[in-house]
Image (tube, helix red, strand yellow):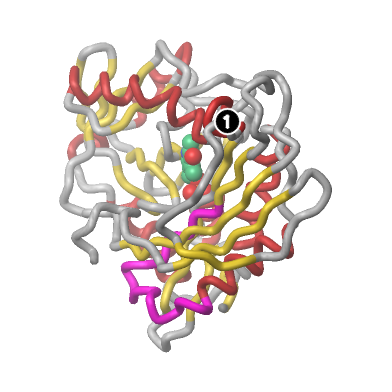
Amino acid sequence: MANNEFGSVFFDEISLATFDGTVWSDTRFQASDTLALHPATHVIHYASTCFEGIKAFRADNNDIYVFRLDDHIKRMRNSAKGLRLPLPNAGQLRKMIVDLLDKYRHQVPAFPASAYIRPTLFGTDTSIGRAAAPSKTAMLFVLISPVGDYFSPNEKMRVLLNTENLRCAPHFGAVKSGGNYASALGLVMDAQKKYDAQQVIFAPNGDVQETAAANCLLINDNEVLTKGLSSEFLPGITRNSILKVAQSLGSRVTERDIQADELIEWIKDGEVALSGTAAVLAPVSEIVYKGDIYAVNGGRPAANSMKLRQALNDIQRGAAEDSFGWMTKV
Ligand SMILES: *Cc1c(COP(=O)(O)O)cnc(C)c1O
């Protein structure tokens, strides 16, 4: 299983509910391999969709824990608001996730693998005339994929620091929506082709924001530095968790704007790492900026990033005390 492409194998069923314009249906379970939709379905034409990415872990004693479940549900409801979609009922969505995990708990792999949970909400009105109108009806499902550790410690990661483009529309960056990925995709492909870079850090007019799918943290022996939350980028739950763990380990945590030139200065003897649920915290090894390639942390290993990654992993797998109250037992 660990050899499969990330997110391409699924539990046999999804949990699903629909909104008819007035109320949410009861939750039902159905096969995870098909979904019938009318060709005029709102989401297919007007991208009325948002999702979450959540992980559940199997602890050494076989208990199963979901990481920061209620924070993810809260963010999904916020994304739904941004898309003017019917808001999922928090209690129902929570139960859709927990019940599906419970039913297929034998398929949750042991750490460092995990169950990657993908709640997805989208507009289902069947009218192609509603380009400028929200969908009154919606579907919500929870799809779960057993995944291996996304992170490979020995792999080099080259990233392009792009000061020319925005990842997505600046008022929409905090919405976890497929359209934002579509907006960034071509620019990431261009960076791969032109610079052999795996990711792009978007820094429009020099303002360092995030990559297409992960937040960006500057880390050294005594500080973690990252841009303060704004409508322009996604408020990552891993970002927030790393900041809290870093603070508890005695680091200074600073949230403020960072200029591209400052980032290039920082990496002479500081680390840069990307944070997200899939990879947790992945150090960047090289940054391409204005046509030059810079070695991050002067080419030395990212010891501080790896220490923070380990500290968060230990909480997630039940090896360290859950002092922040982040883990929900299934
Ligand atoms: C999901 C996502 C992240 C990471 O968020 P986490 O809650 O840490 O998984 C960062 N940036 C973008 C654009 C995302 O979609």
Residue 256 part of the magenta-drawn span: no
| Residue at disc 1, secondary structure | loop
Q: Is residue 256 visible?
A: no
Q: Where is 259 relative to 85, above or below?
A: above
The residue that mark 1 highlights is 40
Left or right placement of residue 271 versus residue 125 in this view: left
In the picture, measured across the screen, residue 203 lies left or right of residue 254, that is left
**Residue at the image point whose x is 49% and y is 51% from the top:** 35
Q: As drawn, is 25 to the left or to the right of 40?
A: right
Residue 95: image x %, image y %? 65, 69
Relative to 203, residue 239 above or below:
below
Query: Which residue is located at x 73 percent, y 64 percent?
Result: 91
What kind of residue is marked 1? Ala
Picture quadrant of residue 210: top left
Question: Which x, y percent locates residue 322?
Answer: 55, 73
Crowding at dot 1, Cα within 10 Å, few <14 / some 14-19 / many 20+, comes out as some
List x then y, in percent, for residue 285: 23, 38
Q: Please report the residue visible at 66 percent of the width from the left and 61 percent of the height from the top.
A: 93
Residue at 47%, 18% (x, y): give it.
166
Magenta-highlighted residues: 102-119
Magenta stretch contains residue 114: yes
What is the x, y in percent for residue 36?
51, 48
Q: Quadrant of residue 43?
A: top right
Can residue 108 be seen at all in this image of the molecule? yes
